[in-house]
Image (cartoon, rainbow, N blue to C red):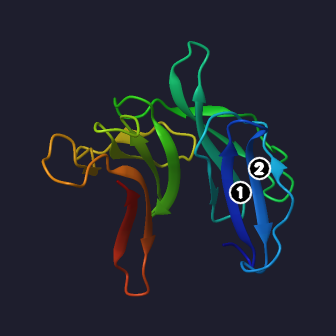
Amino acid sequence: YRDGVFFMTTTNVSNGGNFIVHTTDIYGEWSEPAYVDQGGIDPSLFWDDDGVCYFVSNGLDENNRVSIFLCQIDPFTGEKHSPTTLISYGCGGRYPEAPHIYKKNGYYYLMLAEGGTEYGHMETMQRSKNIYGPYEKCPHNPILSHRDAPGPIQATGHADIVEDQNGNWWLVCLA
């Protein structure tokens, strides 16, 4: 949600790739998809303090290694305002995906799902003073995992975080 507009970005893996839709009435009509010329899956949007919108997704580098990519974008049209730039290879888990960027106290935090959406799934965190990196890995990674733990809840990851009105941080994830 930004300046009175709701945005949603996702991937249609069978037709068209990554796109963004928007609306001013979440219960009303949504825009037509604005397709983004950046591959990968599980994209997200981030607005910096200066109002610039960034599009972040995973994809393959020139050696077919799964990586995280970033570009500046117009969220209404999908038009890129900067080249797609590789910013991370993740923190060592397989298949880094579902990137989310947050900014707090002068640092950009890059949170990723890694390990594949299976029993090795986990959530990792990195940070940098520059949105394009380099990113340093959190020494406490993974920040969320249920790997090798007994019980009915397994394969935790693909998380997002929010701060509530009291300054508490919450994480929501799939499992």
Question: Which residue ends up furthest to the front in the rendered image?
Answer: 152
Q: Quadrant of residue 69?
A: top right
Instruction: Pick the residue in front: 115 or 143.
Output: 115
> Can you give x and y, in whole percent of width and height, for residue 58 in the image?
57, 36
Q: Are marks 1 and 2 in contact (CB under 8 Å)?
A: yes
Q: Which residue is pictured at 42% across the width and 81% down the height?
A: 164
Assign a secondary structure to mark 1. strand
> Can you give x and y, in whole percent of width and height, for residue 6 in the image?
71, 72
**Residue carrying label 2:** 73
Q: The N terminus appears in which quarter of the rendering?
A: bottom right
Q: How many marks?
A: 2
Instruction: Pick the residue in front: 134 or 30.
Output: 30
Amino acid type of the residue tagged 1 in the rendering:
Cys
163 is higher (above) or lower (below) than 110? below
Q: Which residue is pictured at 74% across the width and 77% down the height?
A: 3
**Residue carrying label 1:** 53
Q: Bin the neighbour count of mark 1 within 10 Å (Cα to Cα): few under 14, some 14-19, many 20 and up.
A: some
Amino acid type of the residue tagged 2 in the rendering:
Ile
102 is higher (above) or lower (below) than 39? below
Q: Quadrant of residue 27?
A: bottom right
Q: Which is more N-terminal, label 2 or label 1?
A: 1
Q: Which residue is pictured at 58% across the width and 45% down the height?
A: 42
Assign a secondary structure to mark 2. loop
100 is higher (above) or lower (below) than 172? above
> Can you give x and y, in whole percent of width and height, for residue 138 in the image?
30, 45
Instruction: Pick the residue in front: 30 or 64.
Output: 30
